[in-house]
Amino acid sequence: MPPTEGDTVPAFEALLCDGETFRSTALEEALGDRGGVLICTGFAFSAIAQNWWKQFVRAGWGEFEDVSVLGVSRDGPYAQNEFLRWLDEPAFRFFADVDGAVSESLDLLADRDHMANVSTPWRSAFVLDADREVQYAFVADDWISPLPREEIEAAIDEL
């Protein structure tokens, strides 16, 4: 079962991309002093991910004080960095979950019936405090619904 409010997200380490470089980084090290928001999407350049992340840019998510904005997708680090450059928001970073280990640790990995031998995380958002405790959780039950951006922002304000 994916993490819910009050749970502690499992510790993980993966390649963290910043638009230029990537290095293996633990989630704890990537969180800001107040915590972070972890957004899981299937692939960085999917239409849904492009739509969501451009909305986050327009909403000013790069300006959260001491709160990291972290993506997770199945793309490799070069694609992640290209996506971050396309977004043109230096505050955002992405974990490259190439093997699905991060998504699996969050119990989000789902086989995609219409995509042979492909699994992706359910689209989801978790607002975490600095100790990785979930303050807000959203896991979509379909592949197309938008994220509840206002609820996520309210939870970030409470950190």
Image (spheres, rainbow, N blue to C red):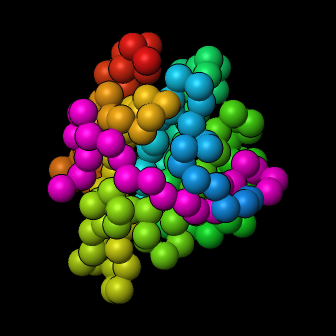
Residue 104 visible in image: yes
Compared to residue 30, the image places residue 108 above or below, namely: below
For residue 115, what is the image quadrant? bottom left
- Residue at 44% over, 34% down: 131
- In the image, is 74 to the left or to the right of 64? left
Q: Residue 82 is drawn in which quadrant?
A: bottom right
Q: Is residue 46 visible?
A: no
Residue 5 in the figure: left or right of residue 68: left
**Range of the magenta residues?**
1-21
Residue 31 relative to residue 83: left or right:
left
Q: Residue furthest right?
A: 20
Between 111 and 131, the one lying in front of the other is 131
User: Residue 116, percent across and down?
Assistant: 34, 86
Residue farthest along the front direction in this orientation: 131
What residue sits 37% from the left and 26% below the top?
152
Instruction: Please indicate whether residue 127 sits to the left or right of residue 62 in the image.
Output: left
Looking at the image, residue 97 lies above or below residue 142: below
Q: Does residue 144 show up magenta in the picture? A: no
Q: Residue at x 80, y 57 (%)?
A: 21
Magenta stretch: helix, strand or loop mostly: loop
Answer whether residue 19 is magenta in the image: yes
| Residue for point 54% across, 44% down | 28
User: x, y percentage for residue 143?
Assistant: 28, 55
Q: Nearer the viewer, residue 50 or 110?
A: 110
Q: Quadrant of the C terminus?
A: top left
- Seen as rendered, the residue at the extreme bottom is 117
Q: How many marks?
A: 0
> How far across and how far down the image is residue 157, in percent?
44, 13
Rendering quarter of residue 108: bottom left
Q: Quadrant of the N terminus?
A: bottom left
